[in-house]
Image: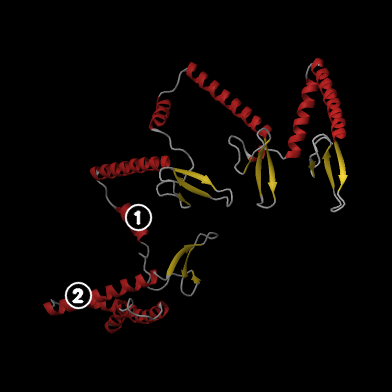
Amino acid sequence: MLDQTSSFLDTAAKAGASHHPTETKVKKAIEDISTIDSGIRTLMGRVKKSLKCKHLTRADAVRKIQDMWKVRKARKHFKALLRSIYKRMEDPVTGKVYYFNTLTEMAQWDKPLGLGSDDYAANKTKKAIMTRVWTQSDAAEFIQRAYRRRQATTTVRQLIHKLYRKVKDPASGMYYYYNKQTGEVSWTKPKLLGQHGDIAVESNAKHQARATVKADPPNEIDAAQRIQRMFRCGMARRQMRGMISRVYVKIWDDTRAQFYFYNTSTKTVSWAKPKWVDEDDLMSPRTHQAFLLQEKVDAIRNGPPDAAVQYLQRLIRRRQARRRLQVMLAEVYEMVLDEATGEYFYHNKKTGNVTWTKPPLI
């Protein structure tokens, strides 16, 4: 058995310099470990029995200790080799643990031979923390260290939050991080930014004010004023959303397969969604036009009779003015056929200018 152990140690020691694949080394190690496992218990029993029965000489004791150390070292090397090959994974359906071989890409429910119970250091560390007996001073020092570490992490996150800005790329739809101080751009989220990197971190003054509110409940007057402010804020936000939805319309772009937003007042186009409003609140151009028309009709119906009369008068005057303008433009422009291209162009009789584009209102 010791010869097999020495053979396994030689294989593990030469693993770095060997050019053989890992699978070959594993097969050789499994052959050696089968003999080691069969003789390890026998060897340990003999050592314990010999120690109880008679006093060993110094040379015999050293030799037995060396044999035990070799076996222990062989097992450690074998476990390390198995850990580099097998991955412990959990089945999301059944919740059971299975083992995946990264070399053969095979999975098995049974734990591989020689992997041991301490195959993951996290479980061992957690078990050691749970079984540790804490004194009052040790617990106080641990809590103080945890509190200082949390304070330092929060401070660093606040500094990073002031330095970086999260921006959405309209082309890919992904977020990148812009350093406002250096002007550099990174697709990877900076460390210690936290899970909610796009939410502003509260300042100390706001945090203290919130803590004061929780510690000292307000009286009836302060509570009423806060409720009124919250109500007015909600009303103002709804009015703001209504105003934005009246100005912006969303239009579908087939090329990029996404919506872009058109400002009907400034005649500008943007790929970024306007603030303070959801995309579902915005309408298409046809729906927006029908909404404005229906809004005018409702205003006339629900308004006073004088307002309806004035609206009809404006509508008639606007239509008459448009007809007069069309007659004037028809007297100025004439449509001429180009024999070379077979298309019509428009000639201004007063200025002599020629245009292929049809003038408005003709």
In the rendering, at what x and y percent does residue 105 appear?
Answer: 50, 72
Whether 280 is drawn above or below 186: the answer is: above
Residue that lies at the very extreme toward the bottom in this rendered image: 3
> Where does the N terminus fall, quadrant-wise?
bottom left
The circle drawn on residue 141 is: none
In the rendering, at what x and y percent does residue 2 appear?
Answer: 27, 82
In the rendering, at what x and y percent does residue 133 appear?
Answer: 27, 50
User: At 33% across and 52% down in the image, what residue appears?
Assistant: 130
Whether 74 is drawn above or below 206: the answer is: below
In the rendering, at what x and y percent does residue 172 appear?
Answer: 57, 52
User: At 36% across and 58% down in the image, what residue appears?
Assistant: 122
Q: Nearer the viewer, residue 127 or 252?
A: 252
Coloring applied to the structure: secondary structure
The residue that label 2 is drawn on is: 65
Q: Quadrant of residue 58?
A: bottom left
Q: Earlier in the sequence, mark 2 or mark 1?
A: 2
User: At 26% across and 78% down in the image, what residue appears?
Assistant: 43
Q: Nearer the viewer, residue 167 or 124?
A: 167
The circle drawn on residue 126 is: 1
Q: Element under label 1?
A: helix
> Where does the C terminus fall, quadrant-wise?
top right
Q: Quadrant of residue 119?
A: bottom left
Q: Callout 2, which amino acid?
A: Ile
Residue 58 lies left or right of residue 70; in this view the side is left
Q: Quadrant of residue 283?
A: top right
